[in-house]
Image (cartoon, helix red, strand yellow):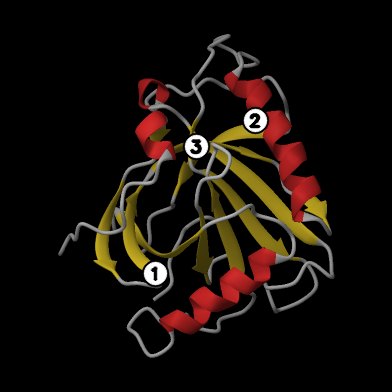
Amino acid sequence: MKVERGMNCQMNCRKLECAPYEVIESKNEFEIRSYTDAMWVSTSPINSTSYKNATAKGFDILFSYIQGNNNQAAKMNMTAPALVNILPLKSTEPFSFSNSSSFVVHFYIPKKYQKDPPIPSSPQAQPVNLPQKHNKKEYLIAAVRRFGGYMDDSNIPNQALALKKSLMGTIMKPKQVGRLCLIVLLATIPHLRWRIVLTKSCSVSIRTN
C-alpha cells in the first residue's frame, strides 16, 4: 500500500492522543486514509432533528465515562477525533436534517486501555471495535475533507456535498447503495479544523469505494 505524507498534522493531534491512520492519497480537496481497527466508546443511537442537540447529549454521556464512570473507575484523557455517525431515518438523502436522524457519538479509547477497555456505568454507552473489517481486511478506506470553522446543522450538508462532488470521476466515487450515512470527525479543541467522511455503510465501517 502506498503511503503519502498527506495533510499537515491537525493541531489537536499535537496535544491529544489520536486514532491512528495512514494516508494513501492526498489532494487539495480531500484525503484518502486507511484506518486500522481500534476500540472506541460509543453512545446508543440518539434520535434528533438537530446535530447540535444530539452531539451535546452524546458528549455528556461519553465525557462522564472518561471521567471515571466506568467499572474500573478509570479517568482517561480526552482523545481525538470524536466521531459522529449520522443516519437519516426517513430520507435517502443524508445531507439534510429536516427529518429526524439517528446520531451515534464515539470517543477513541486511549492506547493504555485498548486491550481492556473499561465498561461504562451508563447503559447508554458501550465499547465498540471500529471500523469493522471489510472482506476480512485489516483496514478500511475513508475519504476525508478538512475545513475550518465551527460545525453546525447548516454547514454539515454543504461540506458533505462538497466532498461527494470532489470524489466524482475518481476511483473513490461513492456508490449509491441504499441510504448513505455521514460521519463527522470532530476536533476536540475549539477553533481547529473539522473533517467530513462519507460512507455507504450504515455503521462506522468507513468505506467509499
Where's residue 33, x and y in %?
33, 60
Q: Position of residue 29 (x, y in %)?
A: 40, 72
The disc placed on residue 40 is: 3
Which mark is in front, 3 or 2?
A: 2
Give the image quarter of residue 152: bottom right
Circle 1 residues within 10 Å: few <14, some 14–19, many ≥20: many
The first of marks 1 and 3 along the sequence is 1
Q: Is residue 197 in view?
A: yes
Mark 1 → mark 3, Cα distance in angstroms: 24 Å
Where residue 82 appears, as percent x and y from the top left, is 54, 42
The front one of 191 and 181 is 191
Look at mark 1 in the image and give the residue it sits on: 30
**Disc 1 residue type (three-letter):** Phe
Along the line of sight, the residue nearer the viewer: 205 or 144: 144
| Circle nearer the N terminus (3, 2) | 3
Residue 120 showing in the rendered view: no
Q: Residue at x 44, y 38 (%)?
A: 12
In the rendered structure, which amino acid carries the disc numbered 2? Leu
- Residue occupied by mark 2: 62
Between residues 7 and 55, which one lies in front from this camera angle?
A: 7
> Which of label 1 and label 2 is nearer to you?
1
